Each structure stands twice: as C-alpha cells, then as structure tokens.
Image: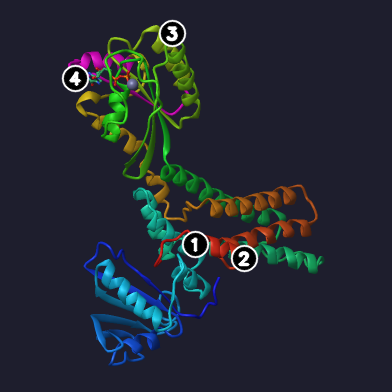
Amino acid sequence: MAQINDTIVAPATNIATQAISLIRISGEDAREITNKMTKKPVPDKRGFYLRKLYEGSELVDEVVINFYNAPNSFTGEEVVEIACHGGILNTNHIINVILKNGARMALKGEFSQRAFLNGKIDLIQAEGINDLIHASNDLALKIGIDNMSGSHNKAVLILKEKLMDIISRIQVSIDYPDYDDVEGSSHEDLILLLQQIANDVDGIIKRSKMAVKSVDGINTAIIGETNVGKSSLLNALINEDKAIVTDVPGTTRDIVEGKINLGNTTINLIDTAGIRETTDVVENIGINKSKEYIKKADLVLYVVNYDNYKDKQNQAMYNLLKDKQHIIILNKSKDLTSEQIKEVNNYFGEKVVTTNALYGDIDNLINLIEDKYNNEEILKEDSLVLINLNQISLLEKVSSNVHKALDNIKADFPIDIVNVDLYEAWNYLGELIGEQYDEEIIDNIFRKYCLGK
Ligand code: GDP
Ligand code: ZN
C-alpha cells in the first residue's frame, strides 16, 4: 500500500442521497490542508468549528468542521471531518479542492486499514465493520456490531493468555526437569486446562458455522406432488411472480431460485418439479433433480394437500426426506375442519403447518421458520461469533493444534513436542486478531470494504 502517513480523503456518507455530506480527511496534514481552504484557521484542538470554505478567493460552501487530534481519532491520525451541503456536485467539488491542496483520494477501506495499523482496532473489529456494511440480515448486523465494538474479541485474548500460561508451565518443566512440583502443572492438570481451551475454541467454531449458514442462506427445497401448490408457495414467499403457476400438472420444470430474509436468517429457495412416476422424459429430469435437491438441501419444505397426503407417491416422497430437516405443509387448507387437520398431524406423527399459498396466507410457515432459525442460541451465549471464513479457518487450525497437543500429552509423548503444537496454536490466535500479519493479506482484507470506510 501507499506510505502510511500521507493524507487521504473520501466521502464518509452516501453523497447521492443525503442533504448533508460528510467528508473525512486523515493524515499528518489534515488540518493544514483544511486551513488552506478556510480564511480563519481551525485551531489545533478537538472540537467543532463553523467555517467558510474557499477555492482561491471563490466561496465554495459554508461547512462545519470537526477536528480530532492524533492519536484520539478513529484512524489514530489527525482527522478532519467536513459536514458540507449534500449532493454529488457540491461534495465532489469540495473533495477536488481538498485534493488540489495536497490530499490523496483514499483507497477502499483505507481509513479502517489505518485504524488497524495504528492499533486502534484489531482484525476482528475491522471485519466487524465490514460485516456491518454488507449485512444481509439481522444476525449479520448484530454480529457486525458486537465484533466492531470489541466487546467479544476479548475471548481471543483470554484464550491466548490461558495458552501462554500452559506453555510457560511446560517450559519450566523442560528447563528444570527435577523441579516437578509447580502447583497445577501435573499431567492431569494440564490435560484439564487444555480440554477447557479446546472446548472454548470448538464452541466458537460451532456457533460461527451456524451463523455463517444463516447469513449465507439455508438452502431450502420445496418438494411435493404436482399441483399441491409449490410454485404458489414460492411466489407467496418471495412475493413476486418468478415461478410459473399453472393448472396443467407437470409444467413447472424450471428450477427457480429466490432469496428471502426472515429476521435472523436468510432462506435460499429452490422450486422443483413434483416427484412422481411418469413416462414424460422432461418431467423425469425434474424428478431426478428433486431427489438431488432433497439430498443437497439444508431444509425441505414438503407440501401436501388433504386429498393426497397418504397416497403412494407421497409415501415414497416422505421416505426420501423424513430424515432431513423438514417442515410438512398442508396447503389448500382453508376449508378443512380441525378434525381433518388433526388427522394429517396424527398420520405423520409430527407437527404439520397449514397454509393457503394462493392467497398469500403462509404466516404459520413463516413463524415456524423464524422460530426454527432464530439463532438466539448463537447470540445468547455472549461470546465471539465469526462470519468471516478466513477467520473461522484460523480458529480451526488453533483447534487442531490444541487437540493434537491433548492427544500427545495423553499418550505420554515428550512434553517439548506438546509445546510446539501449543505455540503454533498461540500464533494462530495472534494472527486472528492481527498481531502478526502479512502486508499483502491486510491489503486484500481492506480492499473488500466500501470507499470511505
Ligand atoms: P405446483 O405444481 O405444486 O407448483 O402447484 P401450483 O403452485 O402450480 O398450484 C397448482 C394449482 O393449485 C393452481 O391452480 C393454484 O392456483 C392452486 N393453488 C395453489 N395454492 C392454493 C391454495 O392455497 N388454495 C387453493 N384453493 N388453490 C391453490
Ligand atoms: Zn410448480
């Protein structure tokens, strides 16, 4: 990347839509550059200042300037924020004047990158900012906020401390082999401590993977006989006419996809042709595809009607999907009595939700999905949750090293071998929060950001 202390500028807000735009300048010369544009200088003191901005002698705008001394700013550098009148023309004009006075246009994510390089935030916080910017559902938003605030990444520091404690105990027993009565350093003690660390790390990995799934989307297949209302259900769910709804059995052969965000989860929808015995070649492709989709799906929405739920095809279909995560949907249920609905419940021996997809009446289904994937468990624990795959893979390396150490210690291997694995785990934790880093990797991380962040 470019030298770290030159002075950069970028809009900090979406300049197209806001009445007031915020422009951020960061770097050694932030205040000096600003003062070239104001007749009355901005004092070298944190605060808000109302100023007229000039290009040469021509008045450009009247603005509010917010000045932060280094290192007490987001980036850790001298920072000037200029609140000017909004709109693309005015904002770009002012940015141009700032560029002419010696600043450089910031790269994407460069403000966050400087905050990281100056030790104002660690990598988990930095990724939190990115997750927040790109959040697709409420869960991603909550995780982004938690991780950005730095309240949850202390978990990593605590793990590092615990590991270092064990490493030190082992090192003492290597250096002073006769001195074998350091309190809490017996084999049994070490195994217990390591097991605890392994559990902590594996817990974070497990919750993180659940979160990733909910943020990326639960792959959901809508399965059922022809004409039960699958396409209508899909339409009701995505609330738009993407799938063909028709009275002629067997005409929905295309696989239509839609993405819906429901509270704390995202559902990726796949419509499939009905699975049934048929001689129609094209329809057969649909059937095999459906079987494939049941296999690949994380969740199967299984649609039946009252007049066919226990026929032969449905028996075969239910057998294919009953061991997967599924929801049984009794569609076209408007005129059914509660006795009839109970009958269906009893037949399947599990909860059946009733819908009338054609009329957009699918609240029972939406509520069940939201309940099933509310992810309260993930958020309730009040511990670190990561949704960045690189970070999760670093934690997996930590886990595998700790488990290897545990196995070796249990097998009575020489204790210095154990320490090699633990030290590696300790290093991976450091990498996770960015204590050790590779400049190129850091550049790549921050270039994913938006301009001005
Ligand atoms: P698919 O073959 O399973 O995809 O079924 P469609 O969604 O194409 O629906 C087949 C027929 O059933 C169409 O005529 C729909 O209008 C109708 N239909 C779908 N859902 C309902 C419902 O909840 N109630 C009623 N009465 N008809 C429905
Ligand atoms: Zn259909």
Classify 344 as above or below 407.
Answer: above
Decide if ligand 1 comes within 8 Å of the CB at mark 4: yes
Q: Nearer the viewer, mark 4 or mark 2?
A: 2
Taking depth in this image into account, of 302 and 291 the one nearest to the observer is 291
Report if residue 353 is visible in the image.
no
Question: Does the segment drawn in magenta span residue 335?
Answer: yes
Q: Rounded to the nearest whole Å, what is the CA distance between mark 4 and mark 2? A: 62 Å
Callouts 2 and 1 close, C-beta under 8 Å:
no
Residue 351 horizontal/vertical position (percent): 33, 24
Classify 451 as above or below 207.
Answer: below
Residue range highlighted in magenta: 322-346
Judge left or right: residue 212 versus residue 228.
Answer: right
Amino acid residing under circle 3: Thr
Residue that numbered label 1 is attached to: 447
Residue that numbered label 3 is attached to: 278
Amino acid residing under circle 4: Lys
Of label 2 and label 3, which has the lower sequence position? 3
Residue that numbered label 4 is attached to: 334
Callouts 4 and 1 close, C-beta under 8 Å:
no
Q: Quadrant of ligand 2?
A: top left
Q: Rounded to the nearest whole Å, what is the CA distance between mark 3 and mark 1? A: 53 Å
Residue that numbered label 2 is attached to: 438
Classify 4 as above or below 386.
Answer: below
Amino acid residing under circle 2: Asp
Q: At numbered mark 3, what does the secondary structure look like: helix, strand or loop?
A: loop
